[in-house]
Amino acid sequence: MNKTKAEILTIGDEILYGQLLDTNSQWMSAELDKIGIKTIRKTTVGDTREDILTAFKEAEARVDIVLITGGLGPTNDDLTKPCLAEYFGCEIAMNEAALQEVSNFFASKGLELTEVNRLQAALPVCCDMVSNKLGTAPGMWFERNGKVFVSMPGVPHEMKKMMTDTVIPQLQQVFQTDIIFHKIIKTIGIGESWLAEMIKDWEDSLPEHIKLAYLPSMGQVKLRLTAIGDNLDKLKVEVESLIQDLHKLAGKYIYGYDTDQIEEVVGKMLLDQHKTIALAESCTGGYVSHKITSIAGSSQYYQGSVIPYHNSLKIDILGVNEQTLLDHGAVSEQTVYEMANLVRKRFNADIGVATSGIAGPGGGTPDKPVGTVWIAYADGEQTITRKLQLWKDRDINIQATAVALLNLIRISLSKSIEIKQ
């Protein structure tokens, strides 16, 4: 089948100035992907005639479909409509169907139809009107030389209604497209380059119609398999077989798929094993507890937490040995070892975990620079500690510590399953 390509063109100075976040493009490209149309570029231009016309010309040369949002308002700085009329070489005239829709819209709101709003119903005569059920600016559909241009309002709910009701169904009639199937495999605890080296032979053996992309984030790497073909069921079977082979190479790092989150996976493991957990967070300030309790139903396994930032609270609330702090300091293996065990007992939990570190940007020493963090896991049978050497950024260090601790819980619970088996 033809590989149908699209470009999304967003018009408006407010987006370029950073005053408005462009959420439209993300939604539109996801919807196009569902019907087998690949978005190859997203472009934003300001409210300048020359820039808009240039963007039209460049997009038409690249793709089959150009979807445009913005610049359809009733004021003089809204240039999309006149630029489209100029680009396609036709005049603007009152469109009676559009005028009726705009009139009905104002009447339904009990408002007077002003002349400015009336002019929104004037459209290039070479386009087909796209009804706007939720606003006053009609959309416009242009076809030329096998290419399609569609202009829609920038207001998200208006654009989405047009796309869902009209644009997507019409695009499916005009273009015969392949099926695109994505599968996300989520890994944790291994860097992108190490993972790539580990699965190199597997990646090299992928069939031509299935591509792999690496999507790294904080302490995690998502692997996206994209399969293209004409039979969805066949693509799913192929991808599933490839994932089974991947598990043989990197299974211990794979924790979930698609929308799974590490805190959700850990919560399910706790539920399945009928275990409870308590936390003692120093450098993370409750962030790990927040991640755990963000999952619905977490009250079934989350006992509680304490945030003993100061040493006196580590001693008074948790019961950490004062001599441990004097001899080794708060940021030490010995301290988090005690914190994890003590919080487990204090909250009558099956598992206790702890964090202590120097998040930054200040507070570091030559022996313990900023980014030095200790984490611990205790379950009454074993206590596991890990030292992390992170970065200079406070927010990043807090997030990275949370990911590392959640992964430590996952690994420890997985080993518990292996032991029982």
Image (spheres, helix red, strand yellow):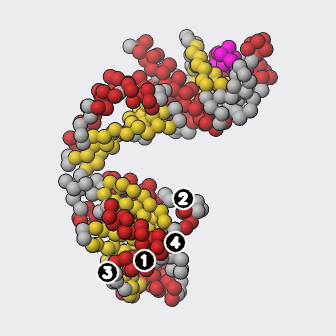
Give 272 or 394, whichever is nearer the viewer: 394
Q: Position of residue 409 (x, y in %)?
A: 53, 23
Determine the CA span between mark 2 and mark 1. Answer: 24 Å
Kind of element beneath mark 3: loop
Give 213 or 167, whichever is nearer the viewer: 213
Which residue in the protein does label 4 denote?
47
SS majority, magenta: helix
Q: Position of residue 261 (x, y in %)?
A: 47, 36
Q: Which mark is residue 83?
A: 1
Q: Position of residue 189 (x, y in %)?
A: 49, 26
Disc 2 marks a residue whose amino acid type is Leu
Up-down relation of residue 237 to residue 41 (above or below): above
Kind of element beneath mark 1: helix
Which residue in the protein does label 2 denote?
21
Disc 1 marks a residue whose amino acid type is Cys
Q: How many marks?
A: 4
- What's drawn in magenta, residue-wise? 330-340
Disc 3 marks a residue whose amino acid type is Cys
Determine the CA span between mark 4 and mark 3. Answer: 23 Å
Kind of element beneath mark 4: loop
Q: Nearer the viewer, mark 2 or mark 1?
A: 1
Please report the residue visible at 24 percent of the width from the left and 42 percent of the height from the top. 209
User: Residues at badges 2 and 4 in contact (C-beta under 8 Å)?
Assistant: no
Which residue in the protein does label 3 denote?
126
Determine the CA span between mark 3 and mark 1. Answer: 13 Å
Tell me the crowding category of disc 4: few under 14, some 14 to 19, or many 20 or more residues within 10 angstroms, Cα based: some
Residue 49, can we see it?
yes
Determine the CA span between mark 4 and mark 1. Answer: 10 Å
Please report the residue visible at 27 percent of the width from the left and 40 percent of the height from the top. 210
Up-down relation of residue 176 to residue 148 (above or below): above
Earlier-in-chain disc, 3 versus 2:
2
Q: Is residue 332 magenta?
A: yes
